[in-house]
Amino acid sequence: MNSTLQLSKNERDMMKEISQVFSKYSGKTRQFGLQLIHSHFDIDKDEILYEVHDKQSRTLITRPTKKETIKEALATAWEIDEMGKVLVTSLCCTIIGPPPPSRKVSVLK
């Protein structure tokens, strides 16, 4: 596996700045990281990526799921659109037990 960062100089500079912002809020929020926004297939407007995991087999599967079928879930990925609006792009698992209020989300249609 090629373990190099595979980032341009501009991307590395951006990462340094983002790292400083993350450090500023360290201990005040949940832990965040970065993910490259990319696509392997189209997702319909009424769908969202939904993570399903199996702890025993240590597998994680992300698949498009109809938003209307998800009652409550944990947002795990966000995207900022051209207008600066933050959009949820991925949800994880049906939550078992009450999550902290700040982590509980309803899927918007």
Image (tube, rainbow, N blue to C red):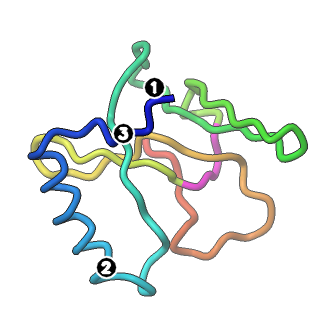
Q: Secondary structure at mark 2?
A: helix
Mark 3, Cα crowd under 10 Å, few <14 / some 14-19 / many 20+, is: few
Q: Give percent across and percent down for residue 91.
A: 55, 45
Determine which quarter of the picture holds residue 82. Answer: top left
**Residue hosting label 2:** 23
Q: Which element type, helix, strand or loop, lies under badge 3?
A: loop
Does residue 27 lie above or below 91 as drawn?
below
Task: Give the residue drawn at x 63%, y 40%.
Answer: 70
x, y percent for residue 49? 52, 32
Towards the viewer: 100 or 107: 100
Check disc 3 and report the residue beneath it. Answer: 4
Residue numbers of the magenta segment: 70-74
On the image, numbered disc 1 is attached to which residue?
A: 46
In the image, residue 41 lies in the stretch drawn in magenta: no
Mark 2 or 1 closer to N-term? 2
Task: Please tell me which residue is depicted at 57% across the width and 64% down the height of the picture.
Answer: 104
Indicate the amino acid at tag 3: Thr
